[in-house]
Amino acid sequence: MRPSISALILNGKQLAADVLKTIPSQVQGQKLFLAVVLVGNNPSSLIYVSNKMKTANRLGIETMLFHFEEDASLEDLLSEIETLNADPAVTGILVQLPLPQSINPRELLDMVDPLKDVDGLHPFNMGMLYEGDENSALIPCTPQGCIHLIESSGVSIEGKKALVMGRSLIVGKPLSLMLSSRGATVTLAHSKTRDLQKEIESAQILISAIGNPGLIKGDWIQEGAVVIDVGISKLDSGQLKGDVEFETAKERAFAITPVPGGVGPMTVAYLMKNILKANKLQQMSER
Amino acid sequence: MRPSISALILNGKQLAADVLKTIPSQVQGQKLFLAVVLVGNNPSSLIYVSNKMKTANRLGIETMLFHFEEDASLEDLLSEIETLNADPAVTGILVQLPLPQSINPRELLDMVDPLKDVDGLHPFNMGMLYEGDENSALIPCTPQGCIHLIESSGVSIEGKKALVMGRSLIVGKPLSLMLSSRGATVTLAHSKTRDLQKEIESAQILISAIGNPGLIKGDWIQEGAVVIDVGISKLDSGQLKGDVEFETAKERAFAITPVPGGVGPMTVAYLMKNILKANKLQQMSER
């Protein structure tokens, strides 16, 4: 066994940079275009959207922000999405979540052309992921980033006991399917889970996507586990904090992501990969 | 705690009869029609198909068997499915699985009109189930039967620790989603799972859909668990046997399904319910 040294820190910033480095050569000669639909002025959303667009531009992917007022009508939003669907110059369409309460996100997400659905939230793409056909589908970015982070630790997923906390369509559910496809025995936990500590103690791979800062105590982590912290919450002090007590957890984990600088940058990197994949799937469907 | 008495036996035959009793009054006045596509002469498939058709007929639902030779071409099968899709007299289309090895089941299943897909295996229906929208989707019959059996025991699913063994699209995956939607903490186990006994020992609700007779020893069952045995294997002696050692398991479980007479009849009953639901969804989509 490993002596009691601190965990391998899974540097998402560096890994994401490595992923992004491979992109310009794949873009070259092609006109790729990401359309971002943003409704309202959620401060976090503004930052996320700006990050995504800047990263795309830096790689030679064009972007445009379709920024609607908080009280935009569903009709106006749907009509914009139809225009973007029909425009052959548009490679990817991203509807930034969350949407204002008055809008049912499904009404928009279901309308995005599945081949331009770079967030992987159209039923067609979710259905393919559920079937286990990852190659033909556009898959949510964050779970792809999580898998990459786990694999970068050198730990094999097959046969491991994995715990995914949070059953959202953007992280928890797709990630649990992807881990299961790769041979992990996956438990999906959520707000109704009773003995969370016990579940965490038995997990060799732990992914938390709850958004409750410090919920997971360091001494609950199984010795030698791989810990991926998708949660990111802003404390009153302004500090960003994950779901896991990082300082104590890293004394027990084999590998752990920091917050920030772990999952976040990987999500953006996989968005870029999804734009390339969307382009490829569109070319294949035209044949 | 309950004294050491034998488990409640979840009588699927009786429960299925109760479900079926409610159907003729819902059928009345409507012409419902189930088309069954069978390829080859797998003896179990012949029995299953005959059971399904007899049950439907008894309830006033018309049926027709489209029986193809083992070496039928994909083109012929697809053309039959297209004809059935286009025929407004056809309410439900069931492609009996397994298909011969030469045919990729997805090529057929993806072609069935989602509104006639009474086995719930079209990507559109699977996507809706994955999203958590059970009302608008046609859902595989066996998982629906399993949920009904669990609920019939009086045990509430919410907050329970459930283990689903087997990750098929027809049982394990949909059932794990349905249990999760109902608030269980679900673990999905499969052939790569390492310490199966330990997983079983911690399960308050156990569903096995492996097809390995007697794989699960009675003394692995948690005291007071609800045990649903989807496995059904024919021994050399001709006897039908489930995945769970029934005689010993029933001394520990709170409730358990027998094999046969447990899940099997419920699957047929929910097929009938799916035909009614398909009819309703078709009427709604016509409006």
Image (cartoon, coloured by chain):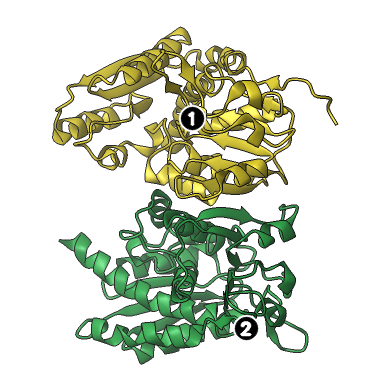
Chain colours: A green, B yellow
Residue at the spot 42% in from the left edge and 19% down from the top edge: B235
Residue lying furthest top: B58
Q: Report if the CB atoms under discs 1 and 2 are less than 8 Å apart.
A: no
Q: Residue at x 63, y 31 (%)?
A: B227
The secondary element bearing badge 2 is classed as loop
Please, which chain is the residue tagged with disc 1 on? Answer: B
Between residue A39 and residue B181, name the one nearer to us: B181
Q: Quadrant of the N terminus of chain A?
A: bottom right
- Looking at the image, which is closer to me, B50 or A55? B50
In the picture of the structure, the residue carrying the numbered disc 1 is B141
Q: Position of residue B254 (x, y in %)?
A: 73, 28
Q: Can you give x and y, in whole percent of width and height, for residue B202 in the image?
A: 67, 44
Residue A7 location, quadrant: bottom right
Which amino acid type is marked by label 1?
A: Cys
Q: Which residue is mark 2?
A: A6
Question: Quarter-wise, where is residue A154 in the image?
Answer: bottom left
Amino acid type assigned to the residue bearing label 2 in the image: Ser
Residue A31 appears in the rendering: yes
Question: Does A64 appear above or below A172?
Answer: below
